[in-house]
Amino acid sequence: MPDLILTTFDWVPHPPRGYVRDLRVRWALEEAGLPYRVATTPFGDRGAAHLAHQPFAQVPWLTDGDLSIFESGAILLHLGERSDTLLPTDSATRATAIEWLFAALNSVEMASLPWSILKFSGEKEDTTAWKQLDGFLTKRLAHLEAILVAREWLAGPFSIADILMADVLRLVDRLGGLTPFPTARAYMTRATARPAFAKAHADQIAHFAAADAAGLGGG
Protein backbone atom coordinates (compact mmCIF):
# COMPACT_ATOMS: atom_id res chain seq x y z
CA MET A 1 0.00 0.00 0.00
CA PRO A 2 1.49 3.39 -0.97
CA ASP A 3 2.51 5.68 1.85
CA LEU A 4 -0.17 8.29 2.55
CA ILE A 5 1.35 11.68 3.36
CA LEU A 6 -0.80 14.52 4.65
CA THR A 7 0.80 17.94 4.21
CA THR A 8 -0.23 20.89 6.34
CA PHE A 9 1.42 24.11 7.50
CA ASP A 10 4.41 23.96 9.81
CA TRP A 11 2.77 26.63 12.01
CA VAL A 12 -0.37 28.79 12.13
CA PRO A 13 -1.50 31.56 14.52
CA HIS A 14 -3.56 30.47 17.52
CA PRO A 15 -7.11 31.46 16.38
CA PRO A 16 -7.44 28.89 13.53
CA ARG A 17 -5.87 26.01 15.45
CA GLY A 18 -8.30 23.13 15.68
CA TYR A 19 -10.01 24.37 12.49
CA VAL A 20 -7.29 24.12 9.83
CA ARG A 21 -8.71 21.83 7.17
CA ASP A 22 -6.09 19.13 7.45
CA LEU A 23 -8.28 18.15 10.43
CA ARG A 24 -10.92 16.80 8.02
CA VAL A 25 -8.36 14.53 6.42
CA ARG A 26 -6.82 13.45 9.73
CA TRP A 27 -10.32 12.56 10.94
CA ALA A 28 -11.08 10.46 7.87
CA LEU A 29 -7.76 8.66 8.06
CA GLU A 30 -8.35 7.86 11.73
CA GLU A 31 -11.89 6.63 11.06
CA ALA A 32 -10.64 4.32 8.32
CA GLY A 33 -7.56 3.18 10.21
CA LEU A 34 -5.36 4.04 7.24
CA PRO A 35 -1.67 4.53 8.10
CA TYR A 36 -0.30 7.95 7.24
CA ARG A 37 2.33 10.45 8.16
CA VAL A 38 2.26 14.23 8.37
CA ALA A 39 4.58 16.51 6.41
CA THR A 40 4.75 20.30 6.53
CA THR A 41 5.02 23.27 4.23
CA PRO A 42 6.15 26.70 5.50
CA PHE A 43 3.30 28.98 6.56
CA GLY A 44 5.34 32.05 5.68
CA ASP A 45 6.84 30.89 2.37
CA ARG A 46 4.22 29.68 -0.08
CA GLY A 47 6.40 29.47 -3.13
CA ALA A 48 6.59 27.35 -6.25
CA ALA A 49 7.02 24.06 -4.39
CA HIS A 50 3.80 24.71 -2.46
CA LEU A 51 1.87 25.91 -5.51
CA ALA A 52 2.83 22.79 -7.43
CA HIS A 53 0.65 20.83 -5.00
CA GLN A 54 -1.94 23.44 -4.00
CA PRO A 55 -2.41 26.20 -6.60
CA PHE A 56 -4.22 28.50 -4.15
CA ALA A 57 -1.39 28.35 -1.56
CA GLN A 58 -3.62 26.65 0.99
CA VAL A 59 -3.51 23.34 2.88
CA PRO A 60 -3.97 20.44 3.02
CA TRP A 61 -2.89 18.17 0.24
CA LEU A 62 -2.54 14.41 0.29
CA THR A 63 0.15 12.40 -1.46
CA ASP A 64 -0.83 8.82 -2.28
CA GLY A 65 1.98 7.17 -4.19
CA ASP A 66 2.31 9.14 -7.43
CA LEU A 67 -0.89 11.10 -6.79
CA SER A 68 -1.00 14.53 -5.17
CA ILE A 69 -4.54 15.66 -4.34
CA PHE A 70 -5.66 19.04 -3.01
CA GLU A 71 -9.02 20.33 -1.68
CA SER A 72 -10.39 18.64 1.41
CA GLY A 73 -13.55 17.41 -0.34
CA ALA A 74 -11.56 15.78 -3.14
CA ILE A 75 -9.20 14.18 -0.62
CA LEU A 76 -12.10 12.78 1.39
CA LEU A 77 -13.67 11.37 -1.75
CA HIS A 78 -10.35 9.74 -2.67
CA LEU A 79 -10.06 8.19 0.79
CA GLY A 80 -13.66 7.03 0.53
CA GLU A 81 -12.67 5.06 -2.55
CA ARG A 82 -10.10 3.27 -0.40
CA SER A 83 -12.34 2.47 2.57
CA ASP A 84 -15.98 1.44 2.84
CA THR A 85 -15.81 2.74 6.41
CA LEU A 86 -15.85 6.19 4.82
CA LEU A 87 -18.00 5.61 1.75
CA PRO A 88 -20.62 2.84 1.50
CA THR A 89 -20.37 0.33 -1.34
CA ASP A 90 -24.14 0.12 -1.94
CA SER A 91 -24.77 2.33 -4.99
CA ALA A 92 -27.79 4.22 -3.62
CA THR A 93 -26.24 4.90 -0.21
CA ARG A 94 -22.95 5.80 -1.84
CA ALA A 95 -24.67 8.34 -4.09
CA THR A 96 -26.41 9.87 -1.08
CA ALA A 97 -23.12 10.22 0.78
CA ILE A 98 -21.46 11.86 -2.21
CA GLU A 99 -24.29 14.34 -2.77
CA TRP A 100 -24.17 15.35 0.90
CA LEU A 101 -20.40 15.70 0.73
CA PHE A 102 -20.90 18.27 -2.02
CA ALA A 103 -23.84 19.84 -0.18
CA ALA A 104 -21.61 20.46 2.83
CA LEU A 105 -19.18 22.34 0.61
CA ASN A 106 -21.48 24.04 -1.88
CA SER A 107 -24.68 24.68 0.04
CA VAL A 108 -23.62 25.06 3.68
CA GLU A 109 -19.97 26.14 3.72
CA MET A 110 -20.61 28.52 0.84
CA ALA A 111 -23.03 30.31 3.18
CA SER A 112 -21.11 29.84 6.44
CA LEU A 113 -17.66 30.97 5.29
CA PRO A 114 -18.49 34.59 4.37
CA TRP A 115 -20.70 34.76 7.47
CA SER A 116 -17.83 33.63 9.69
CA ILE A 117 -15.36 36.02 8.06
CA LEU A 118 -17.75 38.89 8.79
CA LYS A 119 -18.17 37.63 12.36
CA PHE A 120 -14.42 37.60 12.93
CA SER A 121 -14.09 41.06 11.39
CA GLY A 122 -16.25 42.60 14.10
CA GLU A 123 -18.76 43.92 11.57
CA LYS A 124 -21.78 45.46 13.28
CA GLU A 125 -24.79 43.21 13.02
CA ASP A 126 -27.15 45.97 11.95
CA THR A 127 -25.44 46.52 8.59
CA THR A 128 -27.00 45.48 5.30
CA ALA A 129 -24.10 43.14 4.52
CA TRP A 130 -24.42 41.37 7.84
CA LYS A 131 -28.19 40.98 7.57
CA GLN A 132 -27.92 39.52 4.08
CA LEU A 133 -25.24 36.99 4.97
CA ASP A 134 -26.92 36.05 8.24
CA GLY A 135 -30.23 35.53 6.46
CA PHE A 136 -28.57 33.43 3.77
CA LEU A 137 -26.92 31.14 6.32
CA THR A 138 -30.05 30.94 8.46
CA LYS A 139 -32.08 29.66 5.49
CA ARG A 140 -29.48 27.00 4.69
CA LEU A 141 -29.31 25.85 8.31
CA ALA A 142 -33.10 25.72 8.55
CA HIS A 143 -33.24 23.36 5.57
CA LEU A 144 -30.48 21.21 7.11
CA GLU A 145 -32.26 21.17 10.46
CA ALA A 146 -35.38 19.73 8.83
CA ILE A 147 -33.35 16.95 7.21
CA LEU A 148 -31.46 16.03 10.37
CA VAL A 149 -34.60 15.63 12.47
CA ALA A 150 -35.13 12.20 10.91
CA ARG A 151 -31.48 11.11 10.54
CA GLU A 152 -28.62 10.10 12.76
CA TRP A 153 -26.17 10.51 9.86
CA LEU A 154 -26.69 12.04 6.45
CA ALA A 155 -26.47 8.90 4.31
CA GLY A 156 -27.44 6.16 6.77
CA PRO A 157 -24.06 4.98 8.08
CA PHE A 158 -21.45 7.53 9.18
CA SER A 159 -19.45 8.65 6.13
CA ILE A 160 -17.18 11.31 4.67
CA ALA A 161 -20.32 13.43 4.22
CA ASP A 162 -20.67 13.64 8.01
CA ILE A 163 -16.99 14.44 8.48
CA LEU A 164 -17.28 17.40 6.15
CA MET A 165 -20.68 18.62 7.30
CA ALA A 166 -19.83 18.36 11.00
CA ASP A 167 -16.57 20.22 10.46
CA VAL A 168 -18.35 23.01 8.60
CA LEU A 169 -20.86 23.27 11.45
CA ARG A 170 -18.16 23.37 14.14
CA LEU A 171 -17.06 26.85 13.14
CA VAL A 172 -20.65 28.07 12.91
CA ASP A 173 -21.22 26.73 16.41
CA ARG A 174 -18.05 28.36 17.72
CA LEU A 175 -19.48 31.70 16.62
CA GLY A 176 -22.93 31.05 18.07
CA GLY A 177 -24.70 30.34 14.80
CA LEU A 178 -26.16 26.96 15.76
CA THR A 179 -28.04 28.17 18.83
CA PRO A 180 -31.39 28.37 16.94
CA PHE A 181 -30.81 24.91 15.43
CA PRO A 182 -30.68 22.32 18.23
CA THR A 183 -30.92 19.30 15.94
CA ALA A 184 -27.99 20.44 13.81
CA ARG A 185 -26.02 21.22 16.95
CA ALA A 186 -26.78 17.78 18.39
CA TYR A 187 -25.67 16.20 15.11
CA MET A 188 -22.38 18.14 15.16
CA THR A 189 -21.83 17.22 18.83
CA ARG A 190 -22.54 13.55 18.10
CA ALA A 191 -20.05 13.51 15.23
CA THR A 192 -17.28 15.24 17.14
CA ALA A 193 -17.73 12.89 20.11
CA ARG A 194 -16.29 10.09 17.96
CA PRO A 195 -12.83 8.88 19.06
CA ALA A 196 -11.38 9.45 15.59
CA PHE A 197 -12.29 13.14 15.75
CA ALA A 198 -10.87 13.49 19.26
CA LYS A 199 -7.54 12.04 18.12
CA ALA A 200 -7.43 14.09 14.92
CA HIS A 201 -8.16 17.30 16.83
CA ALA A 202 -5.61 16.55 19.56
CA ASP A 203 -2.98 15.69 16.96
CA GLN A 204 -3.50 18.97 15.11
CA ILE A 205 -3.28 21.00 18.30
CA ALA A 206 -0.12 19.12 19.32
CA HIS A 207 1.39 19.66 15.86
CA PHE A 208 1.14 23.44 16.11
CA ALA A 209 2.14 23.48 19.78
CA ALA A 210 5.33 21.67 18.79
CA ALA A 211 5.94 24.38 16.21
CA ASP A 212 5.69 27.01 18.97
CA ALA A 213 8.22 25.08 21.03
CA ALA A 214 10.54 24.96 18.06
CA GLY A 215 10.30 28.74 17.66
CA LEU A 216 8.50 28.71 14.32
CA GLY A 217 6.20 31.49 13.18
CA GLY A 218 4.96 33.97 15.74
CA GLY A 219 4.59 31.38 18.50
Image (cartoon, rainbow, N blue to C red):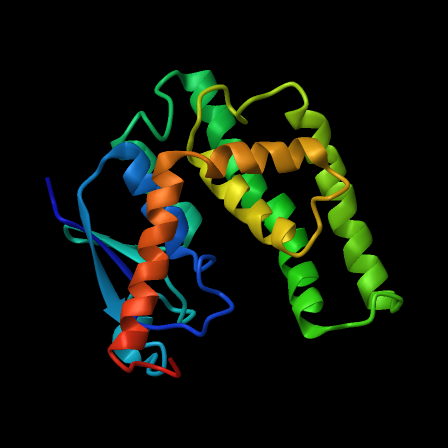
Task: Residue at 58%, 39% (x, y): give it.
Answer: 103
Seen from the viewer's position, the closer of residues 110 and 152 is 152
Q: Is residue 17 above or below residue 63?
A: below
Seen from the viewer's position, the closer of residues 193 and 115 is 193
Q: Is residue 73 left or right of residue 175?
A: left
Residue 46: name its quadrant: bottom left
Q: Position of residue 188 (x, y in %)?
A: 56, 38
Residue 113: name its quadrant: bottom right
Q: Position of residue 57 (x, y in %)?
A: 40, 72
Q: Assign the N terminus to one quadrant of the image.
A: top left
Q: Residue furthest front?
A: 213
- One can see residue 57 in this view: yes
Task: Residue at 43%, 47% (x, y): give it.
Answer: 73
Q: Is residue 146 left or right of residue 15?
A: right
Q: How many marks?
A: 0
Task: Residue at 29%, 39% (x, y): give it.
Answer: 30
Q: Position of residue 216 (x, y in %)?
A: 30, 81
- One can see residue 60 in this view: no
